[in-house]
Amino acid sequence: MAEVVEERTLDTTPTWAVATVCFILILLSIIIEYLLHLLAKYFNKKRRKALIQALDKIKSELMLLGFMSLLLTVSQKLIANICIPMSVAETFLPCGSLTSSESGEETKCVDQGKLSLLSRSGVRELQYLIFVLASFHSLSSILIFGLGMAKMKRWESWEAETRTFEYQFLKDPRRFQLTHQTSFGRRHLRYWSEHRLIRWPICFLRQFNGSVSKVDYLTLRHGFIMAHFEQGTNFDFQKYIERALEKDFGVVVGISFWIWIFSVFYIFFNAHEFYSYLWLPFIPSVLLLLVGTKLQGIITSMCLDSHDKSHVVRGTLLVKPSDHFFWFGRPKLLLHLIHFILFQNSFELAFFTWTWFKFGLRSCFHRETEDIVIRLAMGVLVHFLCGYVTLPLYALVTQMGSSMRKVVFPENVVMGLKRWRAKARKNLKTSDSTGPSLDASLDTSPSFRLDDSITAEFGSPSDVAERVAIEVINGGDREEKGKEKQPQEEHQGNDSFDGFDTNLTSETLSLEKQGSS
């Protein structure tokens, strides 16, 4: 008989072996940290602040999962000594029957005729699951974002077309035409658009065949600019969408509390009694298709809304951005759904990989070939559809809400505005002619106000589109001047930048006033 060899502990292990393992782990950790540092440095050089924040979010989530693994290591003996009755231990088993036996570490529970809440080997297997989940979630989020940005690169040629003479001629406001004669109207004003029961199946199918068409992009771009800017503004809408998507990427890579709760439910429903392989892998795919259908339906609804208001258009059909097209009037709800879809799909792929590695491909977790095919096919399909189809469609349609996001300004312009404002505040505080009332107004107001109109010029006009004018109004005269500028405010719509005039003109703007006047 072969002699049973007990596991060696550190007191019976050569020190050179322990030192070698520690050196390899430290070296790998330093290399990964250095690569992340280089990536953050690259984003900082390109002024991609949103991507830097997303990278910090990834590092925070990795640290959280690593801390969870450390807690499991420290408390594995304590968890193994928690005993539960045998009748309770035989419920909700993933394999349908109790086949594992307790090791020597859990003899305390065996002597009592009970089983451990979670054995030491079970704790170690759970640590493997946490490691695989951290890897899958980080890599899949980056993959999804990369697919979305690759799809949106095609829009650069569409954006460049808006600066051509042919485009300006087609959008000439002196040309009148019927709504259904426009290219956007011919695409959406069909026999099925008036019937809800037929409209939604068509919108469902459209997300698989040209989810974002050229005519949809140009029409939504025109509606966005007309709602928030002056007519004829040379605004780079495609760059704005990219900045907005980078900002949303920071939400997608995070793991919120309610996401963790759904993950716990996912583990619970993997019991044999629930036949989870028949319905659990389809949850992310069904939600993703529902989100894509809703986004296509919003575009059609905006077309119908414009058609109901006027059957004749000047130049081209004008859609009006509004929150009422979205569920519960909240465009951000779609982002939270995409966040949930991506995490749950990553969790399913990580769970499948973990069970394959620890228990084999033909374990009790995957008894049938259909189960393996369904999990793999759904996981890969959801990732591809979300990254290449739904995410670009979301990035375009959600800009058609009532408010405009602050990422409309590039990072260099935002930093220039902050530096200019800080310098002006400093000069006002040190000026003797301003008086105490002006200083008091600065302390009680989030933004300072002057009687004069102050304009400033910033670098990189290609990123800004043109230039940004800043108008600062006296608080006492604000109501009276607001009446005089009422037509302009109605044209700009629900602009979230109070005090900023985003009229981009071709005139040379200069700093007319610095410090105190």
Image: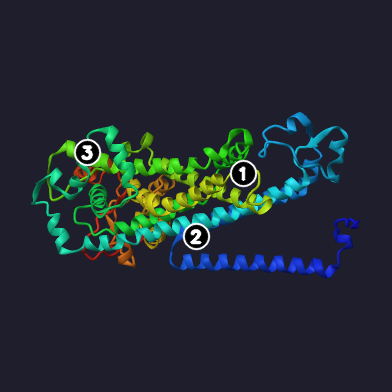
Q: Which of pointers 3 and 1 indicates the residue nearer the eye?
A: 1
Residue 457 visible (yes or no): yes
* Disc 2: CA contacts within 10 A as few (<14), some (14-19) or many (>=20): many
Q: Which of pointers 2 and 3 indicates the residue nearer the eye?
A: 3
Task: Name the element at disc 1.
Answer: loop
Task: Name the element at disc 3.
Answer: helix
Q: First in sequence: mark 1 or mark 2?
A: 2
Provide the residue designation for mark 2: 52
Q: Position of residue 33 (x, y in %)?
A: 61, 65
The alpha-carbon separation of the residues under discs 2 and 3 comes to 40 Å
Q: First in sequence: mark 3 or mark 1?
A: 3
The circle on residue 367 is: 1
Q: Is residue 70 above or below residue 515?
A: above
Q: Position of residue 17 (x, y in %)?
A: 81, 68
Q: Quadrant of the N terminus?
A: bottom right
Amino acid residing under circle 1: Arg
Q: First in sequence: mark 2 or mark 3?
A: 2
The alpha-carbon separation of the residues under discs 3 and 1 comes to 50 Å
Amino acid residing under circle 3: Leu
* Disc 1: CA contacts within 10 A as few (<14), some (14-19) or many (>=20): few
Task: Name the element at disc 2.
Answer: helix
Residue 516 visible (yes or no): no
Where residue 164 sits, quadrant-wise, is: bottom left
Taking depth in this image into account, of 366 and 256 the one nearest to the observer is 366
Q: Position of residue 329 (x, y in %)?
A: 36, 36
Taking depth in this image into account, of 269 and 59 the one nearest to the observer is 269
Report whether 458 appears left or right of 86.
left
Amino acid residing under circle 2: Ile
